[in-house]
Amino acid sequence: MSVKPAFDFDWVSNSDELEQAVATLVNEPLLSIDTETSGWQTGNEQLCLIQIGVPSSKRVLLVDVLGTGAPKALGPILSAATPLIVAHNASFEERQFARYDMKVKGVRDTLAMSRELRPDLPNHTLRTCCKLLLGLELSKEEQTSDWSVRPLSNRQVDYARLDAEVALTLYDYLAGLEERASRELDLGVPELIAEFSSVSRTKFDLMAPIAHEYAFLQAREAKLREAIRQKMIEGAEPYDGPFGKAALSKVKRTEISPQRVREVFPEFALEVIQEHVDRKRFDSVARERGLPKNAIEAVLDTIGFYERLSLSLKDETGVTD
């Protein structure tokens, strides 16, 4: 069913109102965070709106960053151990706040949770998760609208409010699934193995009647995807029709240059350079030293490109990359 926002909402239009709003969030145990930007299509991304869902009072704060300026007042809330902060594709929100040297600490990413707990889904966009897990139909028409224009339209406001609301509903569903899967893990090893055996057998019994056809469909999907990709590499036009969209984009293939690490970050080069530079180790050390998340960009070498197929189907039960 199509869903409309149910929470009340408050506008936060200037820095004084932002300070007042933050004061009301200090003791909240759980919040959701979402953001809207403009200019990302041209590489000039600008944070325009921050949506904060407050489930305890069933309201959403709409923080107009164009009016408040740098939302530094949110820093203590975002970086505290509590509240727990829920976001879908949290890395996007983290990137927006990183522009203001703000870190998000106690975050649960419902995108990562859905990938872990519901790997059967064809994709893990917020729209798909809401449709297939919650039975809620979201419209994403306003996602690419111009969020830098004021006043926002009623449709934009409803879209912004709803994303903050449904992230909380999705988190409740996934957290319940996570809790159910985590029960009785303090048993002894024999009991844990017995339960593991029971779960494995039940899973096998459920899958056995469809396993052959499921394996064929997975293989067929992969073959079709690669055939579409190759056709487009050979010159076929991008597709935008009744079944969805398909297009190619060039994606950099990069590797970390040990020489550039020595030149740009000599203070910790010896910690990360062995026979090669481990990307996770570099990121970890960079975080420990308080460097921005994009510090790695300074030491990457482009070693080529590959053609990535972007394929989306209009039916959310289909694959979307």
Image (cartoon, rainbow, N blue to C red):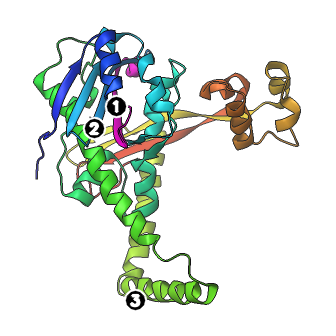
The percent coordinates of residue 238 (x first, y second) are 35, 37
In the image, 2 versus 50, the foreground residue is 50
For the residues bearing labels 1 and 2, Cβ distance under 8 angstroms = yes
Amino acid carrying label 1: it is: Leu
In whole angstroms, how far apart are the C-alphas of marks 1 and 2? Answer: 8 Å
Residue 151: say if magenta. Answer: no
The percent coordinates of residue 9 (x first, y second) are 17, 29
> Residue drawn at (42%, 67%), measured in percent from left and top?
218
Residue 264 seen in render: yes
In the image, 27 versus 290, the foreground residue is 27
Residue 31: say if magenta. Answer: yes
Amino acid carrying label 2: it is: Val
Disc ID at residue 90: none
Disc ID at residue 205: 3
To which residue does mark 1 refer? 25
Q: Secondary structure at mark 2?
A: strand
Disc ID at residue 54: 2
